[in-house]
C-alpha cells in the first residue's frame, strides 16, 4: 500500500537473506530496506534512478540516525513507512519507521543531497519535489549530532579493502556497505553484547574500488562507541556512533 503525498508505505516480509545469525533482521538490511523505500517513493515524483539519470544527477545520503526497539524475526510481515520534510536549498530530510501491526520496531531520520555526475558538486533542491505536496508528518524525536573526525592514535579494530561488489551507480562505495564493513570488524557474539539500540552514521567523503579503509574506535564520554573509517591518507570518510 502506498500514499502519493509526503508519505509512502509498503508491506515487507523479512526474508532469510535479510537476517543475521540470530534469524533477526540485520542492521545493514534495515538500512537497505530504508534506502529501497526511499527509491520507490522518489520514483513517484520522477526523481528516482531513471529520472535522476536523465538529469545527470544522483542522490547521496550524508547522515542517518536510527533507534531500534526490536528487530523482527525471519518471515515476519512488517510495514515500512517513509516520509519527507520540506527541503532547503542544498539538502532534504527523509524519515522512516518499521511497524509490526501497531508496534513500532525502529525509526530514523536521514539527510540527503543531490550531486551532479558532470561536476561532482551539490545541486540545488529547488524544483525537485512537486509543489502540491503537503508536508504534514513530523520528524521522529531523534537528535542529529556531530561526531569528531579525529581518530588518529585510536585503536584499530579492522581493515577493509573496497571491492567491485561494494560500488553503486555513483561509482563509489555504497553507503550501507560502510556499515557492513564496520560491523564485520566484530564477531557475532560481540555484536550481541553491544546490543545496539541507537546508531548514528555520517558519510564524510567518497571511497572507491581498491582503496583500503582502517576502522578505528574510541569510547565517548557518554559511554557510546564511536568508530571512524580512515582512508589511506588518514582522513575520515565514514563516522559512526553506537550505543
Image: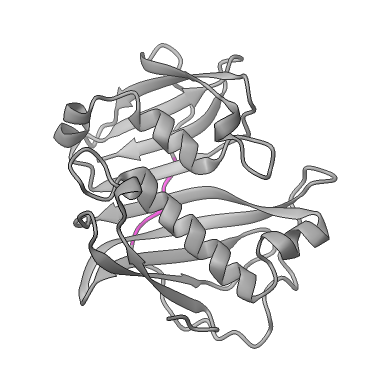
Whole-percent x, y for residue 133 in the image? 60, 84
| Vertical position of residue 79 compared to residue 217: above or below | below
Q: Residue 240 at what x, y percent from top left?
A: 40, 36
Query: Where is residue 192 drawn, in percent x and y?
Result: 16, 35
* Residue 34, picture quadrant: bottom left
Magenta stretch, overall SS: loop
Which quadrant is home to the C terminus?
top left
Magenta-tinted stretch: 142-146
Quadrant containing the N terminus in the rendered view: bottom left
Residue extending furthest toward the right: 118
User: Which sits in the foreground, 34 or 17?
Assistant: 17
- In the rendered image, residue 215, in percent from the top left (x then y), is placed at 42, 21
When asked about the image quadrant of residue 211, the answer is top right
Which residue lies at the image location 24% right of the left edge and 68% below the top edge? 104
Q: Looking at the image, which residue is at 70% across and 72% down?
A: 46
76 or 236, which is in the foreground?
76
Amino acid at each position: 500500500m502506498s500514499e502519493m503525498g509526503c508519505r509512502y508505505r509498503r508491506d515487507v516480509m523479512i526474508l532469510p537473506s535479510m537476517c543475521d545469525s540470530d534469524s533477526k533482521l540485520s542492521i545493514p538490511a534495515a538500512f537497505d530496506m530504508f534506502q529501497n523505500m526511499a527509491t520507490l517513493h522518489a520514483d513517484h515524483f520522477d526523481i528516482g534512478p531513471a529520472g535522476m539519470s536523465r538529469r545527470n544527477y544522483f542522490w547521496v545520503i550524508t547522515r542517518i540516525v536510527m533507534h531500534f526497539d526490536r528487530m523482527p524475526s525471519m518471515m515476519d510481515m512488517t510495514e515500512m513507512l517513509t516520509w519527507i520534510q520540506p527541503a532547503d536549498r542544498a539538502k532534504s530530510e527523509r524519515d522512516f519507521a518499521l511497524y509490526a501491526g501497531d508496534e513500532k520496531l525502529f525509526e530514523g531520520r536521514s539527510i540527503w543531497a543531490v550531486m551532479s555526475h558532470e561536476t561532482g558538486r551539490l545541486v540545488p533542491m529547488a524544483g525537485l519535489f512537486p509543489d502540491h505536496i503537503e508536508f504534514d508528518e513530523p520528524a521522529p524525536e531523534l537528535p542529529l549530532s556531530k561526531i569528531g573526525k579525529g581518530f588518529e592514535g585510536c585503536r584499530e579494530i579492522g581493515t577493509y579493502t573496497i571491492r567491485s561488489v561494494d560500488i553503486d551507480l555513483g561509482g563509489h562505495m555504497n553507503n550501507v556497505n560502510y556499515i557492513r564493513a564496520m560491523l564485520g570488524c566484530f564477531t557475532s557474539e560481540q555484536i550481541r553484547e553491544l546490543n545496539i539500540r541507537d546508531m548514528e552514521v555520517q558519510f564524510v567523503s567518497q571511497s572507491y574500488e581498491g582503496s583500503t579503509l582502517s576502522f578505528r574506535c574510541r569510547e565517548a564520554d557518554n559511554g557510546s562507541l564511536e568508530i571512524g573509517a580512515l582512508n589511506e591518507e588518514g582522513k575520515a570518510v565514514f563516522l559512526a556512533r553506537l550505543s
